[in-house]
Amino acid sequence: MADTRPTPGLSLRALADRWQGVALTLAIGTATLWLAGTGRLILYIHPRYVVFTVALVVLGMILALGALAVGDRDAGHEHGPDDGEHDDSGADLGGGGDRTASGRGVRGGRRLLGLIGAVVTVGVAVALVVLPPATLSSVTAGTRDVGASTLSLGASGGSAATASGGATAKYTVLDWATRLRQSTSLGDYAGKAVDVTGFIAASTTDPRDTFVVTRFVITCCAVDAQPVGLTVYDPNWQQSLKKDEWVTVKGGFGANPAVGQSPIAVVPTAVTKVAQPHDPYLY
């Protein structure tokens, strides 16, 4: 009587094929939890979705571990018709050898594709942990119209014309950009102090004398991030500043002498280089 017990090599191969998805789920889940624990997950998604994402990841990992445990328990009871019930010595009768070789080739191809997928997925998971996440930059801002969506994104603080100086001192780049889309009357901004932080994006119309202090606004995740910015009139700014550097700009609004831009620009009293904020996005 033929021995139907699977060989150790076959059991190991079958286990790897069957639970490959479980291992990948655990790898991605671990990377996601690590990002959440280190506070870096907000560089990929809106903070309001962090708890929801972590809960789903934990649930998925628990289910994956449960499936692995059930699979180990049932592994000794799942012997298919191929587990020792055929004799390869007569496989070539009636073309059986060709079919057997073909089947082995298909299974080998599937295992190769599965191995490639596993390597890629694990590589992505490791990259998420090892490589520092890069925030969106002026290159991305250049491919998306800066300020085009400020009205739909909304902002806090009400009208700049009626807001007190103390209130506008807390305005972000998004707040000011939205107000400027609503009114370009210089009188509405008289006496209003500007104190904003963002990264530098070069102006497309007057890159020598103006730059755009920019932030990205996220509604869901980094994929849908929209850039908003304020034009800063600072002649020859490139002598001391560079694109993508983070700066704090303080000053007020004045007429913008640059042609082809907003008639109002920030006239800075101070432009100070700063470190990138822990949370570089606005919401």
Image (cartoon, rainbow, N blue to C red):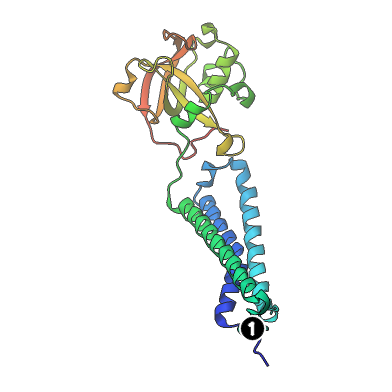
| Left or right, 29 with reference to 243 | right
The spot of residue 244 in percent (x, y) is 40, 31
**Residue 77 versus residue 151 in the image, above or below:** below
**Residue 248 versus residue 231 in the image, above or below:** below
The spot of residue 29 in percent (x, y) is 57, 57
What residue lies at 57% left-to-right and 70% top-to-bottom? 16
Residue tagged 1? 90
Q: Quadrant of residue 88?
A: bottom right
Outermost front residue: 94
Q: Residues within 10 Å of mark 1 (few under 14, many from 20)?
A: few
**Residue 140 versus residue 266 in the image, above or below:** below
| Left or right, 269 with reference to 56 | left
Residue 10 vs residue 217, the one in the foreground = 10
Q: Quadrant of residue 13?
A: bottom right
Can residue 208 be seen at all in this image of the molecule?
A: yes
The spot of residue 213 in percent (x, y) is 45, 24
Determine whether the residue tagged by mark 1 lies in a helix, strand or loop.
Answer: helix
What residue lies at 64% left-to-right and 71% top-to-bottom? 99
| Left or right, 21 with reference to 129 | right
> What's under tag 1, amino acid-wise?
Gly
Q: Quadrant of residue 162?
A: top right
Residue 208 vs residue 13, the one in the foreground = 13
Residue 157 vs residue 207, the one in the foreground = 207
| Left or right, 207 with reference to 103 | left
Outermost left residue: 239
Residue 275 vs residue 25, the one in the foreground = 25
The spot of residue 169 in percent (x, y) is 50, 22
